[in-house]
Amino acid sequence: MNAIYFEGSWQKPFKASNTQQETFYGLSGDKTVAMMHQSESFRYGEPGGGQMIYLPYGDGDLGMYVYLPGEGASVSGTIANLDAKTWDEWTKGLSESQGSIALPRFRLEYDTYLKNVLTAMGMPDAFSDTDADFSGIAEGASIKDIRHKAFVDVDEKGTRAAAVTSVEMRATAVEDPQKPFSMTVDRPFLFAIAQERTGTILFMGSVVDP
């Protein structure tokens, strides 16, 4: 079992008194959500025709990148065209800017099994009753399945997130900086919790209905 837990307080917390009930235009329809607000200086840019902001935690080395696709662009389309090089260019292209951000409170949960994915990626032997070799653990063992669970919870104070990947065995055998920006995240968006210095991503996902 492999697990990661993260709890980070915003370097610049959102004031609960500024949170308002506003409309989020989600994939399944419009809904009213708790929208957090603040005006501050953040690393910000407009790569790929959308808007991107870095909201730091603690001393700033870890933070959340939020990417809002441009009007008419979809999250799924953005993901389909996003690769490591593009993500790196986007994040490194942000610059310190003064402006305002409106971000919904949200909680996501994700649960999936990875056997089919990992088999397709080239490790079918590990799941085979006849071809698996885990003799260093137990004779006649193979992997039954691999399950991955994760959650991310974001509010005015910060973020709590965790992910657990477990292996089940069996015996058988990612604007102009001179002008104040305004970023209202009221439609589907991408986010990533990452280390700014190395670019290492701890959690990444999309929010289509907070």
Image: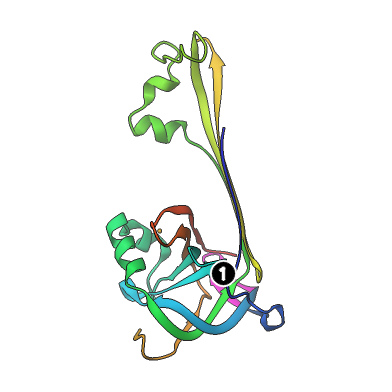
Left or right of 106 in this view: 174: left
Location of residue 39 (image quadrant): bottom right
> Is residue 59 or residue 108 the one in the foreground?
59
**Residue tagged 1:** 29
Res. 35 visible in picture: yes
Q: How is the image coloured?
A: rainbow
Q: Identify which residue is drawn at 52% across, 11% down.
A: 138
Res. 108 visible in picture: no
Residue 142 position (above or below residue 94): above
Secondary structure under tag 1 reads strand
Magenta span includes 55: no
Q: Which residues are magenta?
A: 23-32
Identified by mark 1, the residue type is Gly
Residue 61, position in %: x, y?
Answer: 48, 63
Q: Identify which residue is drawn at 50% across, 72% down.
A: 187
Magenta stretch prevailing secondary structure: strand
Residue 12, position in %: x, y?
Answer: 59, 75
